[in-house]
């Protein structure tokens, strides 16, 4: 095999593995979320496929002429890539929200077979290049480096270009077609250069073509859970069958926001009602506020502040620009002097805001169901306090599961910077009996606890208690303060 062709095949095969690895996070995200466990599982499964594929490819190359194997392997890898799309989307509905076993299973369905087939190509090509034992190290080193360069190139191109320009479906099917065409072209080249087809080759090609068409057909009809596939989310908006003007924003597999297009003051989710109760105690309806919102979502709280306090300013920091466009299109979000949107990281955006420039900071940023770790540290809490005025209010939404390790750590973290801290949460969640939303309420100034407790009881449609002082200290216990140097958020959120 010519050295140039060998280099191209290794570069392409290795690059394809990394495209699969990168895109698989988006493929399984709507069903599993995008957490550290999911990311680690994708890397682990991909490495296992690479190891098994390389070993198998070397084993077969010593027992069969690699020239008879390379083209079928490319075609099979293309078919496996195409088939992984419908397989994951059908199985994902069944495995939605799974723990470790389900995560590994769904990711294996997405990655393992095509990655293993592609990883078998390099040792086969190496075998064809080893014509002189005196150059073995040079050949292996050159092809190994080209494979690594292929992986690096594919990772950067996928992350910076493909994901922004194409849907997951388009990326996966385009890769499948590229691999299939490479296999067919390689088969024709090798047949002309070396020998005519082997007996039964026509039947094999027909079978592979049939499998490929079946995979493409399944991919075309596979259900997609997204209205819009953004750089960070699989997003969709659904109508409320009980309320004509009600809309629910779903991000990945979770209900993220509820909006009543006709009445922004109507709040459906309990945690937004607790936000509103705290805001209403800070400033009675009608008093203008300068509010900062970390995370936009469906813009539920900016709408509420604008509707109840005309003349207020709402600055929203939202990482996902495509989500903002979906909100404009489907949820009637209108920006202007009273509502500004900065597309970018919430912490970086907050850093650029003037000291003592906000009456209210609302923390409601999530990556799936997890507060991004860099928004959960003491340094972040200190930045929030810097931006708040002396009598300002910080409210933060946190989701946690029994035994509630993360919320305890986050309370300890916020309390390290704010002298006044309280917690609004369902009693059963505080007692470790259920998963729930928890709302941290913090201020540099004393909190009106008695009045806030009464307001929560009067306005919340869900059971809620207000915890402060000794009760809150007992709940927090000796929880660790999270810092930029140590913030194991995903591990604290591990259930059980």
Image: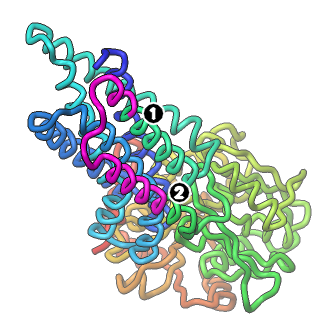
* Residue at the spot of label 2: 418
Depth-wise, is mark 1 or mark 2 nearer the camera? 1
Q: Position of residue 429 (x, y in %)?
A: 42, 82
Q: Is residue 276 above or below residue 35?
A: below
* Element assignment for label 1: helix
Disc 1 to disc 2, how far (Cα)? 45 Å
- Residue 200 in the magenta stretch? The answer is yes
Colour scheme in the image? rainbow
Nearer to me, 168 or 64: 64
Nearer to me, 292 or 122: 122
The 10 Å Cα crowd at callout 1, few under 14, some 14 to 19, many 20 or more, is: many
Location of residue 457 (image quadrant): bottom right
The 10 Å Cα crowd at callout 2, few under 14, some 14 to 19, many 20 or more, is: some
Q: Position of residue 282 (x, y in %)?
A: 72, 69
* Lower sequence index among marks 1 and 2: 1
User: Could you tell me which residue is drawn at 32 percent across and 72 percent down?
Assistant: 495
User: Could you tell me which residue is drawn at 19 percent across and 42 percent down?
Assistant: 51
- Whether residue 219 is visible, yes or no, is yes
The residues colored magenta run 188-215
**Is residue 461 shown left or right of residue 125?**
right
As drawn, the label of residue 291 is none
Location of residue 100 (image quadrant): bottom left
User: Could you tell me which residue is drawn at 19 percent across and 11 percent down?
Assistant: 138
As drawn, the label of residue 154 is 1
* Element assignment for label 2: loop
Q: Position of residue 110 (x, y in %)?
A: 38, 57
User: Could you tell me which residue is drawn at 35 percent across and 48 percent down?
Assistant: 202
Q: Is residue 107 above or below residue 69?
A: below
- Residue 422 in the magenta stretch? The answer is no
**Is residue 96 shown left or right of residue 275?**
left
Q: Position of residue 259 (x, y in %)?
A: 75, 75
**Is residue 205 shown left or right of residue 124?**
right
């Amino acid at each position: 095999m010519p050295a140039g062709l060998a280099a191209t095949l290794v570069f392409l095969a290795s690059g394809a593995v990394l495209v699969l690895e990168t895109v698989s996070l988006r493929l399984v995200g709507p069903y599993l979320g995008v957490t550290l466990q999911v990311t680690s599982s994708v890397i682990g499964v991909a490495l296992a496929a690479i190891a098994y594929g390389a070993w198998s490819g070397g084993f077969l190359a010593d027992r069969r002429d690699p020239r008879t194997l390379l083209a079928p392997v490319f075609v099979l890898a293309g078919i496996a890539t195409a088939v992984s799309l419908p397989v994951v989307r059908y199985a994902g509905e069944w495995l939605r929200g799974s723990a470790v076993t389900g995560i590994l299973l769904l990711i294996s369905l997405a990655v393992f077979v095509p990655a293993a087939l592609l990883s078998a190509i390099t040792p086969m090509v190496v075998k064809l290049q080893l014509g002189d034992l005196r150059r073995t190290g040079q050949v292996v080193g050159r092809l190994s480096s080209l494979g690594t360069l292929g992986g690096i190139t594919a990772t950067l191109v996928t992350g910076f270009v493909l994901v922004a320009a194409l849907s997951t479906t388009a990326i996966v099917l385009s890769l499948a077609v590229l691999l299939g065409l490479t296999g067919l072209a390689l088969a024709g080249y090798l047949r002309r250069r070396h020998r005519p087809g082997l007996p039964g080759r026509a039947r094999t090609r027909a079978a592979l073509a049939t499998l490929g068409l079946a995979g493409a057909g399944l991919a075309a009809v596979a259900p997609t859970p997204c209205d819009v596939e953004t750089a960070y989310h699989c997003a969709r908006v659904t109508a409320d069958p009980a309320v004509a003007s009600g809309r629910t924003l779903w991000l990945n597999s979770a209900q993220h926001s509820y909006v009543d297009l006709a009445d922004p003051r109507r709040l459906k989710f309990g945690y937004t009602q607790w936000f509103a109760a705290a805001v209403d105690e800070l400033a009675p309806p009608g008093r203008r506020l300068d509010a900062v919102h970390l995370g936009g979502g469906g813009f539920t709280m900016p709408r509420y502040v604008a509707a109840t306090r005309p003349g207020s300013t709402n600055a929203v920091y939202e990482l996902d620009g495509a989500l903002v466009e979906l909100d404009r299109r489907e949820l009637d979000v209108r920006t202007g002097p009273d509502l500004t949107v900065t597309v970018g990281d919430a912490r970086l955006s907050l850093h650029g805001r003037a000291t003592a420039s906000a009456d209210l900071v609302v923390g409601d940023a999530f990556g799936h169901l997890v507060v991004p770790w860099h928004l959960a540290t003491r340094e972040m809490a200190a930045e929030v306090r810097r931006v708040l005025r002396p009598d300002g209010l910080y409210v933060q939404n946190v989701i946690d599961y029994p035994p509630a390790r993360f919320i305890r750590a986050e309370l300890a973290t916020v309390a390290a910077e704010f002298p006044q801290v309280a917690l609004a949460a369902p009693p059963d969640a505080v007692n470790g009996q259920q998963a729930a939303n928890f709302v941290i309420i913090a201020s540099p100034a004393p909190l009106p606890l008695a009045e806030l407790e009464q307001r929560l009881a009067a306005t919340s449609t869900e059971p809620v208690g207000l915890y402060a002082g000794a009760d809150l200290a007992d709940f927090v216990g000796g929880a660790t303060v999270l810092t930029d140097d140590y913030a194991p958020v995903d591990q604290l959120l591990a259930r059980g």
